[in-house]
Structures are given as C-alpha cells and as structure tokens.
Amino acid sequence: MIPPTATPAATRITRPPGALVIEIEGVTKLYKMGAETIHALRGVSLKIHRNEYLAIMGPSGSGKSTLMNMLGCLDTPTAGRYEFNRKNVATMGDDELADIRNREIGFVFQTFNLLPRSDALHNVELPLIYAGLGKSGRLDKARRALENVGLGQRMGHKPNELSGGQRQRVAIARALVNDPSIILADEPTGNLDSKTGEEIMALFEQLYAQGNTIIVVTHEEDIARHARRIVRLRDGLIESDKPVE
Amino acid sequence: MLIREILRLAFSSLAANKLRSALTVLGIAVGVFSVIGVMTFINGMRDSIETGLNVLGANSFQITKFPPINFSDPGTRFRNRRDINYPMADRFKELMADSAKVSLQINRGGMTVNVRDRKTNPNVRLIGTDENYITAFNFDVAAGRNLGADDVEFGRPVCLLGDDVATKVFPGEEALGQLVRINGQNYTVVGLLARKGTSFGNNPDNTVVTPITRFLATYGRSFRSINLNVQASNQTELPATQERAVGMMRLVRALAPEDPNDFETFSNESLIDAFNSIADIVAAGALVISAIALLASGVGVMNIMLVSVTERTKEIGIRKSIGARKRSILLQFLSEAVALSLIGGVAGVAIGVTGGNLVAFLLNTAVTFPWLWTGIGLAVCGGIGVGFGLYPAWKAASLDPIEALRYE
C-alpha cells in the first residue's frame, strides 16, 4: 500500500477548470449476449472540463470500461447524448471517430499496447503518421514527447528492451504527442509494481501541472486519490461524483 | 496516411516473417515463371522463324509428297501416296517452264565425303538437284560455278560443296577441280556454296550438291519421292503460279477431276503459319497452366494474409485506438498482399526470362525479352494481390477496436 502522503500536499496544485470538453447526458449502452441483454450503462450524465484531473472508479461490472470506451470514442452509446468539444459524437461515423481518437484523445492502457517490433520513437511517432504529418515534423514532436517523459536516452529501444515503467512512459509519450484535449488512462498502474506505479502517477501529476486534462479509470482507491475529482460507478449508474479533499 | 509509410510498413512486416513470405512468393513466382518461360521461348522461336525458316527463296513454294508439319492426320494417309518420280517431276518442270523456275530436289543424309586421307563425319547431306536449286533455297555461289542444265541433262559427276564440307576436306587448299569421293563415287568439285549458317538444328552448310540425274543413277530411280520447288517471277504472280502448278501437277499425276490432290503445296508463309498455330496452342496451354498456378498461389496469398490479420489483431486494435482510419488499415494489409504478389511476379519474370532464353539459346534461336508478357504477368500479379488481399484487408479494417485491443 502506498500512503496517500506519497504526493506531498504542497506540490499538489489544483488548476481552475476551463472550457467544457466532454458532456454526456443520459447515456445508455446495451449489449446483446445471446438471448440476454446486458445494460452496461443505464443513463449516465457527466461533464468534464479542460484542466480537470478525474478518476472514474467502480468495481468490475460497474460499467466503467464501457464508459471509458465511450469517452475514448472507441464505442458509441445506444442512446443519450455525447458531445466532445461541443461536437456530437454519438452520431459520428467510423472515420470521424478515428480522427477524434487521433487528435483529441491520448490513450494510456494497462498493458501499454506498444507495437512490439517498433522502437520507442516509432511507437510515439505513430499517431502523427495517421495525422498525416511530414517525417521531420513527426520525429521532432516524437523526440520532444519522449524527452518530456524522461526517456530521451531510450528512443531507439524496442518495448522488450524496456522496463514496465519505461514502456508505460513510452505509451504516455505516445498519448501526449498529438497534443490531445484529454488523456484517457485505463488502469495505468495495473501492470506495474507499486513503486513504479507511484512514479507513473507522479508523471501524471507533472503532466496535469503542465496543463493537460487527465481521466484515469481505476479500481484502486490509492490511484484514484491522485485525481482532483472522483466519479464512482455502480451497476451502470453514477453513484457519486465528488472532488478529492 | 502517407503512401511511403504504408509501403515501408508492408515491407517491414513481410521481412518479419521471412520464411512465410518467401514460400508465398515462391507460389506466385512458379505461376508467373511458367507463362513467362514459355512465352520467352516461343517469342525466340518466332523471331528465328521469320528469318531462319526462310529456307525457301522469295516468291516460291514447294510441292512434296508429305506435308512439312503434320499433327492432325495419320501418317499412313500420306505414306500410301505415289512417290513423285523423275519422269513426273521432269514433265512438270517442262510444263511450268514458261511461267516459273522449277527446281527438283532429292537428298540423302549420313554421307561421308572422302578426299585422299581426309574425310568428314558421316553426317553430310547429299542433294540431287538442278540448276535452279541455288535460287530456290537462297544460296550464293562463293567460288566456281553453279550446276548447269547440261550437267543435269547428261548426269555429269560434278558437285558443289557446302562451306562446312569444303573447309573440312580442303583446309586452306584450292577445292575447285579436285575430286571428292562419296559412297564409292567420284565427283569433280565445280563450285563452292557461300556460308548460310545453322537454323533449327538444320545445317545447310554441311551438304554436297550434285545433279539429280547423277544422284538417281547412283541411288536408284525409285528411291524416294522428289521435292519440287517452284519460283514465281514475282510476288503478284505467286497465287496464279501456285494455282497453275497444282493444275499441272494433277495433270502429270493423271488425277481424275474428282480425285483430291495427292501431294502438298506449301510456301514460307504457310510454314510460318503452321508453326504459329502450334506456338499458339503451346502458348494457350502455358496460359491455362499459369492461370491455375496463379489461382492456387492467390489462394496462398489470401491464406497467409488471413493468418497475418489474426496474428496482428492486437496491433490493429492499437492502431485504431490511436486514430488509424479504416482506409489506412485496409491499405496497410492490401499493400502487403500486393507487395507479396509483385515480388513473386518479378521473381517469376526473372526466372522465366532466364529459363526461356536458356532453352532458346540451346536450340540456337533468338534471345528475347517478352515485354508484353512481362507487363501482363506483373499486372496479373498486382491483380492477384488486390483480388486475394482485399478480403483479409477488409476483415482487418472492419475489426472492432475494443475487441481487437482485448485480443491476446
């Protein structure tokens, strides 16, 4: 267990919320599993502003993965309204969703999800390729992103030549490289030991301080307490939505 | 997504599975090889045919007992025909004298030419013919004189030597006026034929030319059928001459009006046509075989691409999660399939052109590069890549990103 004091209160700044980034209202999601229909989300409403650091918590089966996929534009709601930067996402096609994922969202996954055959630099460069950036511009931005997460010396290494913490830093650099509106982290410390996990959370703290908007999905109370606001889900509904003292 | 990135990606993932890629490429290469190899060889043959098969002189055609090329009819049908004997041939020549030059020709291979202690291999062709032989078969007299009508009339023991024979038995010596001995008979050399060069394994320089009357006196009048070469005065006269020749031939053969011709007429053009029709059949066969081979290898490409898509489901999920559009994924896998096919195609063309030309070289025909078939081959390979790569690529592009990310 990591004591909550691992992040000294003195360095813990809270930035005033900016413009509305995400607004969902009455969102439901149904899955058909054979004859059975599963209500993953039963009407969730949520507003997330720029400069927020939000944790979404909930036990397994609470619908937090579904919510995260929806926030990340990997999935669309069955019913309800979802606006991302004031644009209606619920009715978007595959290509438009892909563009939103590319430009507005930076994913950080529990299992890092790096391309195993590509080195760190290429992994970070990848979103910029899909964004259609030229080679020199891509490499510049990718190098800066890797330096920002403290991996300036490891750019030529492949994922299997990096430690778990380093891999997650590469993944975070990849999430940051296209200057997204939000960073969406799904159990970012789930595959790391507690010390490395704490380092990654410190990195998130630093990124937040630099002006990024961060959403962390987790079931760990200690990880969630790094955020400024915690949304708790249960059975497809928001149970509570409170700032962290 | 930039085309260069897509190509780089395609080649790097092919390189990551070298053996698998190589085997698929091999399948395509075999299919392309078979068509390119055969087409290269046939092209070489055609080129040689245009020049090499030009054995007959211009504006000329030939009348023989047997057809020059026969695949369809039973040989017995021709074997039972009467030979064209000397009286018939001589009469025919007389009848045609005012409209065309006729050359009688009969030959026998496997002869040895002896001059004192020197002799040739027993593979010299002895040709019994007349004064028109030279023009009928495009020969030039290098030294001395041609056979004369009187040589034929009186059956004089004279001869002209082919270039190979002359250099063999008279190396650096004056051959004219000398005696050569063939099968126990002496002939006086009156002329030397200019070198013509080998074509189709036929060596027109390894011959001895002698009056047909002398030949028949030695080897028997009823020995074999005589070939007749008819040369029209010019190109426009050729059809009329041919028609007239058929009529005269029927006359000397004493055929009743209802009898079919019991002889064959053919010209350079008809020989080339005959070859071309065979070449077309071979080419069609090669095409069918190639089509089947390419179909099979196309299935191989599809199979390998499906395996690749399944293996890389997670990668596809990652790419989609960071913003790859459907089209980017589709192009990535499609270009991989097309790259596989095209590499196979290029390899097949290389082996095919080399192989086809090697065979052509061994058969002394022209060395060629079949541009048209190379183009067609590569286009078909590209088509195979697209055709058989489309479904796997579409499958990859349509994967649900959430499912794909969860795939282990």
Image (cartoon, rainbow, N blue to C red):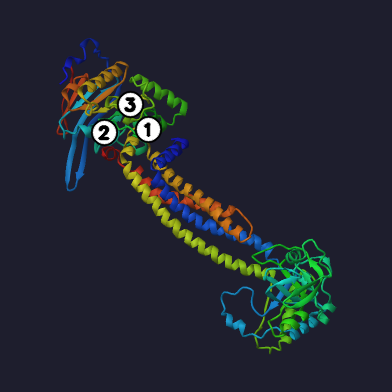
State the image quarter where residue B71 is shown: bottom right
What is the three-letter code of the residue carrying label 3? Val
Which residue is at a point 78% across and 81% down the rendered structure image?
A: B213
Provide the residue designation for mark 1. A118
Q: Observer-nearest residue: A158 or B245?
A: A158
Subunit of mark 3? A
Provide the residue designation for mark 3. A170
Of labels 3 and 2, the one closer to you: 3
SS at circle 1: loop
Q: Residue furthest top?
A: A10
SS at circle 3: helix
Residues at circles 3 and 1 in contact by the CB criterion of under 8 Å = no
Which class describes the residues within 10 Å of circle 2: few (<14), some (14-19), or many (20+)? some
The quadrant of the picture occupied by the N terminus of chain B is: top left
From the viewer's perspective, is B199 left or right of B375? right
Provide the residue designation for mark 2. A70
Q: Position of residue B77 (x, y in %)?
A: 59, 83
Residue A86 visible in the snapshot: no
